[in-house]
Image (cartoon, grey):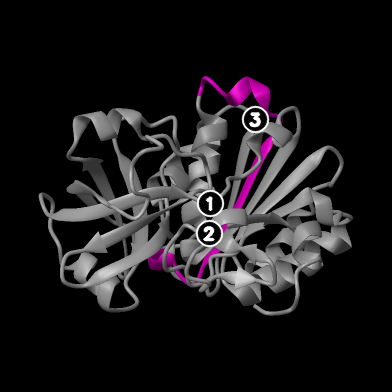
Amino acid sequence: MSGERNPLLPYRATIREIIPETGDVKTFRITLDNSQAAAGWRHEPGQLAMLSVFGAGEAMFSISSAPTRRDSLEFSIKRMGKLTRALHEMEAGGRIGVRGPYGNHFPYEKFQGKDLLFVGGGIGMAPLRSLIDFVLAAENRPRYGRVEILYGARSYDDLCFKAQLLDGWHKKPDTVVYSTIDRAEARWTGHVGFVPAYLEKVAPRPEHKCAVLCGPPVMIRFVLAALKKLGFADDQIYSTLELRMKCGVGKCGRCNIGAKFVCLDGPVFSMAEIAELPPEF
């Protein structure tokens, strides 16, 4: 984006499509109203943007679409509070504000030539989806090795991105998808159990591989323990820290951890980097 523009000034955008993912998660496909701004928009996998609903406020969300998708942006948002309720009540054609992109990104340059393991839970798949689709895009796929995707949710109804998860990603070259739900259901013929236990059962080998995680804190804690047990080192593991961010430009001090600002230095950190942060989150 232009360096002259006030980074706190949102662009007006239009919701083009709303895709129900679960009972409380929707994916909003939007375009910027200003054609010049839309043409100049560049984001990387893992970056964030601030969305505003007029009269309801603004909040930071992961961009869930890959930058290889040029015609629109997608945000997959769980209904949790005032702003997200306002978003969920909107319809296609509604207007919102967008500013960004903010933060660093998944280090896909470092990942080139390596195998990748994605581990997600619930709405935590949103930022991972941006990187997965980026890696699996035809223009990028030859740069990466085998891709394994392990994703779980409480129930079938709580699985996000079902079209890609169940009938899309596994059709890409050298790509394997493992999906699981917490409790058995009559209509589900796949694996049943929690993500960390399934990860140990799948037992991916750590050689020449990086793992990228996002999900509920309790899942992350047990997935990290499982990865350590499988032999992954801290510098092979990456995750996102999406603390409460207010300004997005490192001015308000809402998301700092020690000297680090999640909105500037994150949200993506390796476990080696997280281990050096003070225990303030």
Disc 1, SS:
loop
Element at label 3: loop
Indicate whether 268 appears above or below 225: above
State left or right for residue 145 relative to residue 106.
right
Alpha carbon separation for disc pair 3 and 2: 34 Å
Q: Where is residue 277 in the image (x, y as percent from the top left)?
A: 75, 69
The amino acid sitting under disc 3 is: Asp
Give the mark nearer the N terminus: 1 vs 3. 1
Which residue lies at the image location 80% right of the left edge and 49% below the top edge?
236
> Circle 2 sits on which residue?
263
Q: Is residue 210 visible from the viewing direction of this image?
A: yes
In the displayed structure image, the side of residue 159 where residue 204 appears, left or right: right
* Residue 100 falls within the magenta-colored stretch: no
- Front-lying residue, 159 or 201: 159
Examine the rendering and report whether any part of residue 191 can be seen. no
Which percent across, then down, holds residue 151?
A: 57, 57
Q: Residue 174 carries which label?
A: 3
1 and 2 marks in contact (CB < 8 Å): yes
Judging by the rendered image, the residue that carries numbered circle 1 is 103
Q: Which of marks 3 and 2 is nearer the N terminus?
A: 3
Residue 24 position, x and y percent, is 32, 70
